[in-house]
Image: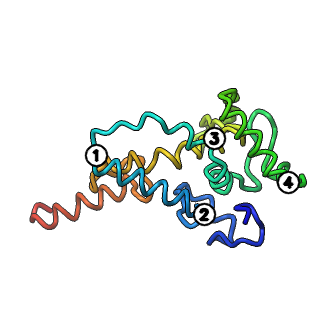
Amino acid sequence: MQPLDPQVHYGITDRDFLDVHDVQMDLLPGKLHELRWKLNQKAKKEPKFRFYALYDRVFRMDVLEAAWKHVGKKDKAAGIDGVKAEDILAEENGVEKFLAVLHEELKTKSYRPSPVKRVYIPKADGSKRPLGIPTLKDRVAQMAVVLILEPIFEADFLDCSHGFRRRRKAHDALEEIRANLRENGSL
């Protein structure tokens, strides 16, 4: 069975739901889910262990396919190369070809990230906020790296750590502080 087979249900029917930045476990193939679990368990059990050889996991086809499912959304801005997900999806076997090229570039170490497109978003006060838009190929490559590295770094965080972690916001940390203060009678 091809992981990109349109007949396969990956657990999410609404593509807009994919705008959430979390790695959605139900979009991951079983082997990738198992790999992430093993990496996490190894990192938890041996905190001093250093993972030196992970690059070969990044360009695995199942990792690239899962990365595509997370970032290959329609109606998203194109990077500096002008390529949008719609362009790739419109071609026959477009996704498979796109991922095969990226796979080969990563495998042969000829992949080079493209410059990031800079756009400015107007703010309410009249100023503008800069925003960088990477190419679709770079987004897929970056997500593939996240899929492999995230479980390793998650193992190092304490439960009370909130910064830059999925499903944990600064507001959650503030709420926890308030709850602890209430518990101790300081608030």
Q: Position of residue 126 (x, y in %)?
A: 62, 38
Q: Quadrant of residue 38?
A: bottom left
x 68%, y 73%: residue: 9
User: Which residue ends up furthest to the left in the rendered image?
Assistant: 185
User: Which tag, 3 or 2, sits closer to the chain's start?
Assistant: 2
Q: Nearer the viewer, residue 184 or 11?
A: 11
Q: Which mark is residue 141?
A: 3
Quarter occupied by the C terminus:
bottom left
Pointer 1: what residue?
46
Q: CA distance from mark 2 to mark 1?
A: 28 Å
Q: CA distance from mark 1 to mark 4?
A: 42 Å
Q: Position of residue 111 (x, y in %)?
A: 68, 30
Q: Which class describes the residues within 10 Å of circle 3: few (<14), some (14-19), or many (20+)?
A: many
Q: Is residue 177 left or right of residue 127?
A: left
Pointer 4: what residue?
93
Instruction: Give the amino acid type for the residue marked by disc 2 in the picture.
Output: Leu
x 73%, y 62%: residue: 2
Q: Nearer the viewer, residue 6 or 160?
A: 6
Instruction: Give the amino acid type for the residue marked by disc 3 in the picture.
Output: Ala
User: Which tag, 2 or 1, sits closer to the chain's start?
Assistant: 2
Q: Which mark is residue 27?
A: 2
